[in-house]
Image: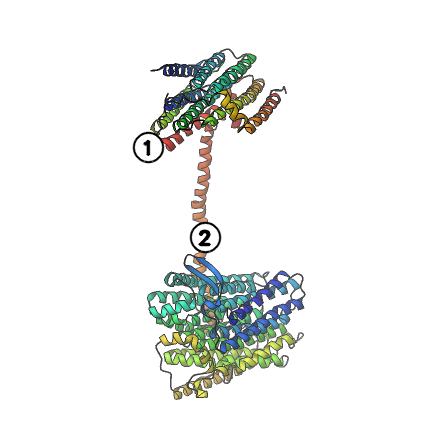
């Protein structure tokens, strides 16, 4: 077992564990914090796959911006208590069972599917900033510019919705 | 395309154009213009028909590929072309239809003049469409084209019988005609399906040549029977004849058109056209003969006691059609066509004459209120007399020759046919002269303040032309007896190419020798003259006051053998009862229950299912996930396991 | 690492996200679970991107950029997710202002 594999397993376990913690913590603030850990683990996977640019963006955008926004909202609403009302027990178990079943079915489907076992997916340097930047500002420049319009409209929308009255 | 095919399509196109112009412009065109367009279309058709007749007499025919205009129905290897076939038989029918049709149009311009502008144009539009359909029927080169025309005349008869649609009785009569025709049409349609299934084509010449080589079979008997059912409906034979007397609801010229030139002769034409098939099915032939004979006698007996002048003529038409079927049934195809022709002349004459009388008597149709019209309407009187003599079968008027030809052929086939046929002919003579006497002789029994007057020029013109035709048309078919020409008469020679195949297949009946024929002729003429004299003598002194309610057998006759009532009791009442049963029991208890039950079940179910629609987003997502699980399981996983 | 491992990991994360959406009633946590699901898909996309790239390299193409599209997709997904979060949180804030709760069971207006 090489270093890569060891790191993979550690990162995977961290990701899954903290993901489970996200959905089981009563206090939403803990959930957010565990989610940040999950995202860091996923970023670690990106680094492992030699996709540094995405790893950085993931940390900056998700862990940095989005989840801070979540935290900010939680603080704003003062929801950091264990305020969630009890859910219907039956529904709870049914939901958990459905989720588990989905997992089972998906895994089974992938398992039965024939997947070519490509080795060495860590090679290559397309995940580097220079490569991605070239593609982004040549072939994909139009969608990239359009995302700015998306952001503008999202911003306007958020302001409109968030306005009092 | 040969020259003839360029000419042929003109014949039906003129009435069609007339129909379109009159039908679409009915609110804008003046009556005069409508009359000119309507009659002019027929005149042009008639002229074209004459040209065609000349060409056909010169030996030019339009048969098979040459007559194809375009593909009408085509799928796979099966093809029904839109094609015309012009041969001797068609050319004769074309002349009769367009010629008599033209006279009726001219007559109508005057007869229908009281109608308002729009209705007048509507009338002529229908009339033109009627002629168009009939032309299509006789010109088609296959059974499908014939069927189009066949349906077309059915539709137009419905439209024209119900022309005065505000009268409920008239629309009912129209419906009756339509339904009766539909019963027959079903037979025709089944026959077409059989033909397609067996021969793979509907074109006459292909079917006939195939049938000739295959010889007779039970399938051909079935086909001919089905075709005959169609003919029974259209040509008003027992038991589907009751619509024809009711068709008197339409304007009188329409009756003339239906009875003389078009529609009812369609059945005769169809069987004459299919003579090869019928010759291969001897049992059907005997059935045709027997049905025709029965109809002839039966309808004649009803006509004896009718008081409505148009009803008398209607039953006489049914009876005469019976003779034509008798002729077809005994293999005298030429005789039947001959009789169609002469009948077209004298029956159109009689109807138009009756129309003239009705017109003069202010729409009084009851003969008991006529009498002594000779004085007031000389032209109508003379022409009607000629018509009556022609239909009664007095030489040298046309009816004598044609009817005689059929009766002699019937004698050759079976003397009993002849005796019954002659009996019917005697009744024909009696009721025709009863009608004539009651109308024109004796004293005037109508309202003396409104004395009748002779009809206007266009009407008398048509009458005179038809009277001349009715008088002399018989000479084209002078029997061998008079001409001593061993090749038969002119019409038979002319039509021989059409019927030679059919006649060759038929068992030859020994033609009676000349002595027998002379005796038969003498007997029939003598008896007919005696009957006429009796009828005239009886009804000349007819007084309205003396007329007692008919008793006994004559009551049965006056009530038309109660056929309508029997149909009512045997068919309509049970159907209504079944309908009632279905309406009251099945509908309310069964279908309504079922329908309402479905509604209730859904209502109940949805009330239960509504709990599923909690409006709770979580539940919706749960259901969605479950659905995704099932989908994934089915799409990706199931085929492998 | 073989591609299978990444697929399984992504599926596990995704299903955890689904389960979270189903079991929790707090709208913010549900939102976070959706982000988790998005991230698991991102992870899968990157893994596939690298797989295609590795195959292209193995096939002998030296300066290939095969598979780079998937990483760009991930980039765009992050962009869209950021926008989505902005709007979504605005909606949740508004909802909280109206109902003084972030419990999605109060959002049952669809019922009527």
Q: Which callout, 1 or 2, points at the residue further toward the start of the chain? A: 2
Give the alpha-carbon distance from disc 1 to disc 2, as whole Å: 59 Å
Query: Residue B520 appears at what percent x and percent y?
Result: 41, 85
Report in which chain the residue with disc 1 lies: B
Q: Is residue A102 above or below residue B275?
A: above
Query: Residue B5 appears at what percent x and percent y?
Result: 51, 69
Q: Which mark is residue B640?
A: 1
- Residue at 45%, 47% in the rendered image: B587
Query: Residue B15 appears at what percent x and percent y?
Result: 57, 67
Residue at the farthest top position: A81
- From the viewer's side, name the closer residue of B624 and B65: B65
Residue at the farthest left position: B641
Disc 1 versus disc 2: nearer the observer: 1
Q: Is residue B538 above or below residue B24?
A: below
Report whether residue C30 is seen: no
Report in which chain the residue with disc 2 lies: B
* Mark 2 lies on residue: B580
Name the quarter where the N terminus of chain C is drawn: top left
- Crowding near the residue tagged with mark 2, few <14, some 14–19, many ≥20 C-alpha atoms within 10 Å: some
Residue B280 location, quadrant: bottom left
- Crowding near the residue tagged with mark 1, few <14, some 14–19, many ≥20 C-alpha atoms within 10 Å: few
* Element type where label 1 sits in the image: loop
Report whether residue B185 is seen: yes
């Amino acid at each position: 077992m090489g270093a890569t594999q060891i790191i993979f397993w550690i990162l995977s376990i961290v990701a899954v564990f903290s993901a489970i913690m996200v959905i089981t913590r009563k206090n939403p603030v803990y959930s957010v914090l565990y989610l940040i850990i999950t995202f860091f683990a996923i970023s670690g996977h990106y680094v492992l796959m030699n996709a540094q640019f995405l790893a950085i963006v993931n940390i900056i955008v998700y862990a940095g911006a989005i989840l801070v926004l979540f935290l900010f909202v939680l603080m704003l609403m003062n929801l950091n208590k264990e305020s969630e009302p009890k859910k219907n027990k039956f529904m709870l178990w049914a939901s958990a069972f459905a989720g588990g079943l989905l997992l089972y079915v998906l895994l089974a489907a992938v398992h039965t599917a024939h997947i070519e076992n490509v080795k060495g997916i860590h090679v290559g340097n397309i995940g580097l900033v220079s490569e991605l930047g070239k593609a982004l500002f040549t072939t994909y420049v139009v969608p990239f510019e359009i995302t700015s319009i998306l952001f503008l409209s999202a911003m306007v929308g958020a302001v409109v919705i968030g306005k009092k009255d | 395309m040969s020259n003839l095919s360029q000419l042929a399509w003109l014949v039906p196109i003129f009435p069609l154009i007339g129909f379109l112009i009159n039908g679409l412009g009915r609110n804008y065109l003046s009556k005069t213009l409508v009359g000119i367009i309507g009659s002019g279309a027929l005149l042009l058709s008639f002229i074209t028909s004459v040209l065609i007749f000349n060409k056909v007499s010169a030996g030019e025919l339009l048969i098979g590929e040459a007559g194809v205009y375009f593909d009408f129905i085509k799928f796979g290897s099966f093809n029904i072309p839109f094609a015309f076939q012009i041969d001797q038989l068609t050319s004769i029918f074309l002349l009769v239809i367009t010629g008599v049709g033209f006279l009726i149009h001219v007559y109508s311009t005057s007869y229908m003049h009281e109608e308002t502008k729009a209705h007048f144009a509507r009338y002529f539009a229908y009339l033109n469409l009627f002629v168009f359909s009939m032309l299509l029927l006789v010109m088609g080169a296959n059974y499908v084209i014939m069927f189009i025309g066949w349906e077309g005349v059915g539709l137009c008869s419905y439209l024209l019988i119900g022309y005065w649609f505000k009268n409920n009785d008239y629309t009912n009569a129209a419906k009756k005609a339509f339904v009766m025709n539909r019963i027959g049409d079903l037979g025709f349609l089944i026959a077409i399906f059989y033909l397609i299934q067996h021969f793979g084509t509907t074109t006459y010449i292909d079917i006939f040549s195939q049938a000739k080589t295959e010889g007779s079979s039970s399938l051909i008997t079935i086909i001919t029977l089905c075709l005959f059912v169609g003919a029974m409906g259209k040509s008003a034979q027992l038991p589907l004849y009751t619509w024809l007397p009711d068709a008197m609801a339409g304007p009188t010229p329409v009756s003339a058109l239906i009875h003389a030139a078009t529609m009812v002769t369609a059945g005769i034409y169809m069987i004459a056209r299919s003579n090869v098939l019928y010759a291969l099915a001897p049992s059907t032939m005997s059935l045709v003969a027997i049905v025709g004979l029965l109809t002839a006698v039966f309808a004649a007996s009803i006509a004896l006691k009718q008081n409505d002048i148009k009803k008398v003529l209607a039953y006489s038409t049914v009876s005469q059609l019976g003779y034509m079927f008798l002729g077809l049934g005994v293999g005298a195809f030429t005789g039947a066509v001959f009789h169609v022709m002469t009948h077209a002349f004298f029956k159109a004459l009689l109807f138009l004459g009756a129309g003239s009388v009705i017109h003069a008597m202010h729409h009084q149709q009851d003969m008991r209120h006529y009498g002594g019209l000779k004085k007031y309407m000389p032209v109508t009187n003379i022409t009607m007399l000629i018509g009556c003599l022609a239909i009664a079968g007095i030489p040298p008027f046309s009816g004598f020759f044609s009817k005689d030809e059929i009766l002699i052929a019937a004698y050759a086939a079976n003397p009993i046919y002849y005796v019954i046929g002659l009996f019917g002919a005697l009744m024909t003579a009696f009721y025709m002269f009863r009608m004539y006497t009651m109308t024109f002789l004796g004293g005037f029994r109508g309202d003396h303040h409104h004395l009748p007057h002779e009809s206007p020029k266009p009407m008398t013109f048509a009458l005179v032309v038809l009277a001349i035709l009715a008088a002399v048309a018989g000479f084209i078919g002078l029997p061998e007896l008079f001409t001593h020409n061993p090749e038969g008469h002119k019409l038979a020679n002319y039509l021989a190419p059409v019927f030679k195949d059919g006649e060759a297949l038929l068992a030859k009946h020994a033609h009676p020798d000349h002595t027998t024929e002379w005796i038969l002729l003498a007997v029939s003429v003598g008896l007919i003259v005696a009957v006429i004299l009796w009828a005239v003598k009886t009804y000349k002194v007819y007084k309205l006051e003396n007329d007692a309610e008919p008793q006994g057998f004559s009551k049965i006759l006056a009530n038309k053998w109660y056929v309508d009532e029997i149909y009512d009791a045997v068919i309509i009442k049970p159907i209504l009862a079944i309908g009632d049963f279905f309406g009251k029991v099945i509908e309310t208890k069964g279908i309504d229950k079922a329908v309402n039950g479905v509604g209730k079940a859904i209502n109940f179910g949805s009330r239960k299912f509504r709990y599923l629609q909690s409006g709770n987003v979580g539940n919706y997502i749960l259901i969605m996930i479950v659905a995704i699980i099932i989908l994934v399981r089915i799409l990706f996983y199931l085929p492998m396991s | 690492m073989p591609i299978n491992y990444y697929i399984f990991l992504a599926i596990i994360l995704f299903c955890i996200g689904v389960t979270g959406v189903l079991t929790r009633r707090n709208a913010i946590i549900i939102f976070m679970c959706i982000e988790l699901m998005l991230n698991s898909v991102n992870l899968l996309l990157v893994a596939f991107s690298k797989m295609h790239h590795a195959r292209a390299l193995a096939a002998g193409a030296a300066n290939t950029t095969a598979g780079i599209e998937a990483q760009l997709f991930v980039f765009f997904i992050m962009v869209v997710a950021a926008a989505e979060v902005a709007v979504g949180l605005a909606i949740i804030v508004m909802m909280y202002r109206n109902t003084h709760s972030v419990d999605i069971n109060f959002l049952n207006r669809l019922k009527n």
